[in-house]
Image: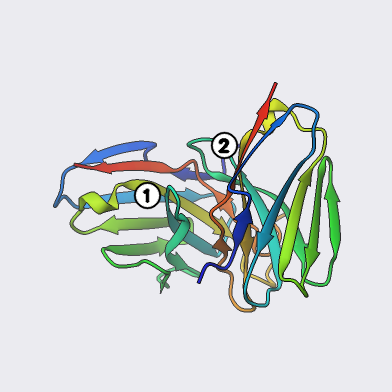
Amino acid sequence: SQQGEEDPQALSIQEGENATMNCSYKTSINNLQWYRQNSGRGLVHLILIRSNEREKHSGRLRVTLDTSKKSSSLLITASRAADTASYFCATDGLSGSRLTFGEGTQLTVNP
Amino acid sequence: DVKVTQSSRYLVKRTGEKVFLECVQDMDHENMFWYRQDPGLGLRLIYFSYDVKMKEKGDIPEGYSVSREKKERFSLILESASTNQTSMYLCASSLRGGLRASGRIGSYNEQFFGPGTRLTVL
């Protein structure tokens, strides 16, 4: 079964607006990560939140984690055209170093 | 300051050819991974390695093999390429959990990706 599932699949907003993406997962985790992928490129790590954390900030990024609902959200504030990319959540399960990625949310920020 | 490199950005091969995809990282990471990415399917793990000469199957290992002879290099091999292996291939590396030392790059489980190889099999 898919461990990380993002919602929505695609999101289109105007520059300056906030963008919120959600991720749900099925099994217990140690941590959850968010990655960004520009078109045709590799993924870049954005932020990691541990299972005992509820919220984390990094610049314009805010991540929340609700382990009781097995869900996370990524908020990008004051979006810019350069934020246009696909965003993936990734979970690690409880053992090992492998991650399971969701299918991603395609964010388009219109200038 | 590119840290994970892949041998080719674009590759075109014919059905039945043996294909080698090379990945090199310069961060002294223990773990290395090969994924393929297809529209609507996200990233799927093919194989990973947590040490030299060690390998473990991921979710879709069929039709692939790997080689890790040196810590910095992880190779993905398609023994006999088929059209359904046309895809974007992504390599990644990460620190082994609990082994983070001063000066090493990355937090536990943070994966660093290469730019990807877009393979087309005709």
**Residue A57 at least partly seen:** yes
Quarter residue A98 falls in: bottom right
Looking at the picture, does residue A90 appear above or below residue A51? above
Question: Where residue A55 sits in the image (x, y, percent)?
Answer: 85, 59
Q: Secondary structure at mark 2?
A: loop
Chain to which mark 1 belongs: B
Image mark for residue A38: 2
Q: Quadrant of the C terminus of chain A?
A: top right
User: In the image, what residue type sits under mark 2?
Assistant: Asn
In the rendered structure, the answer to whether residue B17 lies left or right of residue A43 reads left
Query: Which color scheme does this rendered protein use?
Result: rainbow
Which residue appears at 41% of the width and 57% of the height?
Answer: B74
Q: Position of residue B5 (x, y in %)?
A: 48, 43
Alpha-carbon distance for marks 1 and 2? 22 Å
Q: Which residue is mark 1?
A: B22
> The numbered mark 2 sits on a residue in which chain?
A
The disc at residue B3 is none
Please report contact status of discs 1 and 2: CB closer than 8 Å, yes or no.
Answer: no
What kind of element bears circle 1? strand
Name the residue at the left extreme: B16
Q: Residues within 10 Å of mark 2 (few under 14, many from 20)?
A: some
Labels 1 and 2 within one chain: no
Q: Label 1 crowding class (10 Å Cα cut-off): few <14, some 14-19, many 20+?
A: some
B83 to the left or right of A60: left
- The image position of residue B106, as x and y in percent, is 68, 55
Does B117 appear above or below B32? above
The residue located at (58%, 57%) in the rendering is B28
Q: Amino acid at mark 1?
A: Glu
Residue nearest the observer in this picture, A20 or A28: A20
Based on the displayed image, in which of its 4 quarters is residue A101 positioned? bottom right
Outermost residue to the top: A111
- Residue A80: image x %, image y %? 74, 28
